[in-house]
Amino acid sequence: MRQRPISVTVFGILNIGYALWKFVGLLLMGVALRMNLSANPALAALNSDPVYKAWSHFSVVIGVVFGIVLIASGIGLLLQQNWARIVAIIYAVLEMIVVVAGAVFTQRVMMQTMTAQVHGAPAGVIAAFAQIGLVVGIVIGLAYPVLLLVFMTRPKVVESFSPVQSS
């Protein structure tokens, strides 16, 4: 086996850390979903939307699955297993799809709900804030999977996972 590149070590540790961060976020999301939202009419309306509620439950399930995949991939990267590099690449692609779909979907539902709930604010202001939130959410959400994809497909990293030829 060849020497492990530093980027593989870094992303192995980051995968494990990011998975733990996902689990903390999921716990907080679970607590938030069970809170009494009647004090905030906009959040109560958002939570009463069946499509948004279904997306929230889907996000929890996919978050748990992705968290487990990241932990396994992180450990595998630290052990320099090629399957872990492939799993990291697959995770990165799927996470990018989920981030974009989730941001667009959530922004659309929020626009409908918030426009109906916020009285007195010009519709253009609500739409502008929604678009800014969409862009910021996508950029932040895509940062890690894009970096992971770029680094796991670098020639030096790919070569480090190939079996050593004995002469």
Image (cartoon, rainbow, N blue to C red):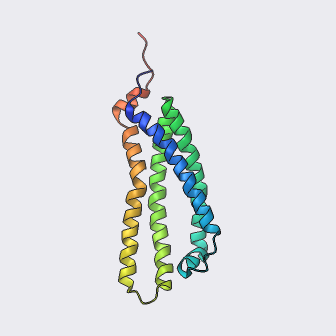
Residue found at x 49% / y 47%: 18
Left or right relative to 128: residue 97? right
Q: Position of residue 158 (x, y in %)?
A: 39, 31
Residue 64 in the figure: left or right of residue 165: right
Relative vertical location of residue 24 with respect to residue 12 in this rendering, above or below: below
Pinpoint residue 107: horizontal percent, then vertical percent: 45, 71
For this orientation, the residue located farthest to the front is: 39
Q: Is residue 38 above or below residue 103?
A: below
Looking at the image, is 60 positioned above or below residue 20?
A: below
Which residue occupies 42% across, 16% down? Answer: 165
Vertical relation: 77 (above or below) 124: above
Q: Where is residue 15? Give x, y as percent.
A: 49, 43
In the image, taking residue 112 as reference, residue 123 lies left or right, namely: left
Q: Quadrant of residue 125?
A: bottom left
Seen from the viewer's position, the closer of residues 84 and 47 is 47
Count of numbered labels shown in the rendering: 0
Snapshot quadrant of residue 154: top left
Residue closest to the far top: 167
Residue 102: horizontal and vertical position, in percent?
Answer: 49, 63
Quarter of the rendering occupied by the N terminus:
top left
Residue under the point 45% across and 47% down: 92
Q: Nearer the viewer, residue 158 or 118?
A: 118
> Image quadrant for the C terminus?
top left
Q: Residue at x 34, y 30 (%)?
A: 156
